[in-house]
Amino acid sequence: MSYTVQGKREQSTRVDADLEAIASRLLSDFPGEIEALVLVGSFGRGEGTIVVRQGELCPVHDYDIVIVSKDDLPRERLSQAASELAASLGLPHIDLFSYRRGQLASFAPSLFSLDLKAGGKVFHGDPNALQIVRSVDPSDLPLDEARRLMFNRLPSLIESVHEGDFRGAPEGDDAFRIAYMASRVILACVEALLIEAQDYHPSCRERESRFLSRFKRYRCLGGLVRTATAIKLHGVDASFDVIRYWLWARRFYLSTLFRVVCASYETPLADWWDLSSFYDRWFYFFWRRLVTRLFNTAKYQEWGAIQRRVRLELAEIFLLLARESRGQVRPHYLERAGEYLKSVTGTANPSGWEEIRRQVVEWDFKILHPH
């Protein structure tokens, strides 16, 4: 199998060894339960990113593994296996998704089902395990998929920098980390806009071509997308001003997010303050939680969790809005980010962009993206 666009044998050898270790651990933890293991995501499509660090080949991002199992597998054991495998293989994360074979046939059109069908590679077990998955026409992807994708990428820019990066000139691994995470955000914007245009394609290279053709009059965006694709597919060195690149990615992301939210909800919104009011919906959440608390405790807890998630996402949005440039932070946006964060944590308002950023990252892993 070729896991990267370069198709180098040593890269494939590294990924093959990792997949063998993953299969060995999962088969040991769940004997007789696994029918197939499928590699999905960038590496499954042959567009993974591998770089050389200290003379060793290192995958930059996580492996996404779909487990086709006979019965439902315990989430706690899957989470533990994913964490321990990532640590042993030197990877940021390993994402494990477990489904029974019958569930595969019921997937609705989505980015995940399209990626599974078009780019999934079975590396253990029944080679025909994916035949039951329905084919998805990319033009049938609902706009909600674009909205979900954009919110999934929301923490990426915030995690990749700290205040000191805006006062200096990041180099080496720090520069590559910032450029790579910014590139992921830029390419997510490309995906979202192509979904909106009903012109999506599962390949990153084809998406670049379609975007450049469709948005050819936006030359700055074209250069941004070309750079992001090169970093994503080839792991090229970030020998440029990565903070300027980050700021461009932030601008592209926020404008695309606003556009997609308005389009997906078919609701015209005036500005970010209007968007925050739409998403927060204090009275809606208050009355919904009050009613469910009286009649359904589990639902009450679920709505409380949704409310916290929404407010944390709003804190992240306003934190990005506050960072206008290297040295300029807009206080009214920063204040609103702190207020939303306080409503999530229950502690005193944090002060300063960096302190809010640090807490947002911490709570994002607790609430939105626990690994």
Image (cartoon, rainbow, N blue to C red):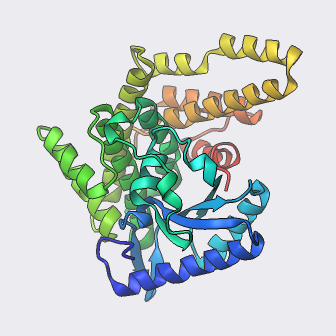
On the picture, is 298 further left or further right than 169?
right
Q: From this viewpoint, is residue 165 visible?
A: yes
Find residue 49 and report its image quarter.
bottom left
Q: Position of residue 329 (x, y in %)?
A: 45, 37
Identify the residue shown where x is 67% and y is 56%: 371
Frontmost residue, 345 versus 98: 98
Outermost residue, left direction?
217
Q: From this viewpoint, is residue 238 visible?
A: no
Figure quadrant of the N terminus: bottom left
Is 190 placed above or below 51 here? above
Is 78 placed above or below 15 here? above
Frontmost residue, 55 versus 284: 284
Find residue 51 and report its image quarter.
bottom left
Q: Position of residue 164 (x, y in %)?
A: 49, 56
User: Total marks drawn?
Assistant: 0
Is 288 placed above or below 81 here? above
Identify the residue shown where x is 41% and y is 62%: 42
Q: Position of residue 347 (x, y in %)?
A: 76, 35
Identify the residue shown where x is 69% and y is 43%: 367
Find residue 19 and report its image quarter.
bottom right
Identify the residue shown where x is 53% and y is 21%: 276
On the picture, is 74 further left or further right than 306?
right
Frontmost residue, 84 versus 272: 84
Is 339 placed above or below 14 here? above
Frontmost residue, 334 versus 56: 56
